[in-house]
Amino acid sequence: MTIDTDKIAVLLDLYAYHHLWEILDDKINDETYFLLESLKERRELNVAYLFKKEKERKQCEAYFNHQLISNPYEKELLANYIFDLEAKLRNGKIIDFVRAVSPILYRLFLELLENQVPELADYINNSKSSQYDTWNFHKMHASNNKAIISYVSKKRDGKVTSSSLSELIQHTDLDETVKKTVSDLREFEKSVRNPLAHLIQSFDEEELHRTTGFSSQTFLAKIIDLALCCDVVYNREKFYFDQMNSLILKELKND
């Protein structure tokens, strides 16, 4: 059966991998099928798929002569969150972008802090539910870590949030540029929360700039800056999904 590569190219540009996976199901070879399925799983934030299917992944990488992952598992999770953010922006889904910012900020702030406070997990009570984790102030007050001592010198809210993590970061020895990036991102998150919670009008790029004073691209760039500080490998110049799209389209046109 002939594959309409023009139609496929449109869907690839939309990063609509689940739809493509269904369309191309039995029309492509095993390596292309695996690549497409891995992209579908990435859009669903299931990075574990690529690590569980190591044999198939290596076969696919050899076939296309292209690496599918660039980081250890935990850092690849962070990279994949940003892939998803960038895909949302490229498709003009500003509301979806803004709503997806909080989870990646929380994880990036944690990652930054774990490098400064190796025992960080000891100071956090896992809620083991959908509720917020909480700070273990008893252990924090007994800490020898300078950042922790400074942080708990004032009365703090007990919830572990992006806000409290960003505040703790300001007490570390991280570079001031990094601290400023963290503050900017936290302010962005805070400034858009209320408009989104009471959304009564379209929330586009213009409204985002009016609300925050920054563009979505600026904030994506700052998020990537922070990820790079956490030693996450992320290619700014060549977007991952676009690279994979080129491999798939080239393969389909050669068939």
Image (cartoon, rainbow, N blue to C red):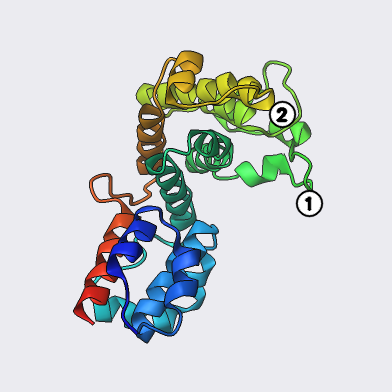
Mark count: 2
Q: Where is residue 248 in the image (x, y as percent from the top left)?
A: 30, 70
Q: Residue at x 61, y 42 (%)?
A: 120
- Which quarter of the picture shows residue 36? bottom left
Q: Where is residue 46 in the image (x, y as percent from the top left)?
A: 54, 63
Secondary-structure class at tag 1 = loop
Q: Name the residue under label 1.
A: 128
Q: Where is residue 141 in the image (x, y as percent from the top left)?
A: 72, 29
Quarter of the C terminus within the rendering: bottom left
Front-lying residue, 44 or 207: 207
Quarter of the N terminus within the rendering: bottom left
* Dot label at residue 141: 2
- Which quarter of the picture shows residue 106? top right
Residue 231, above or below 30: above
Label 2 neighbourhood size at 10 Å, few (<14), some (14-19), many (20+)? some
Front-lying residue, 82 or 72: 82
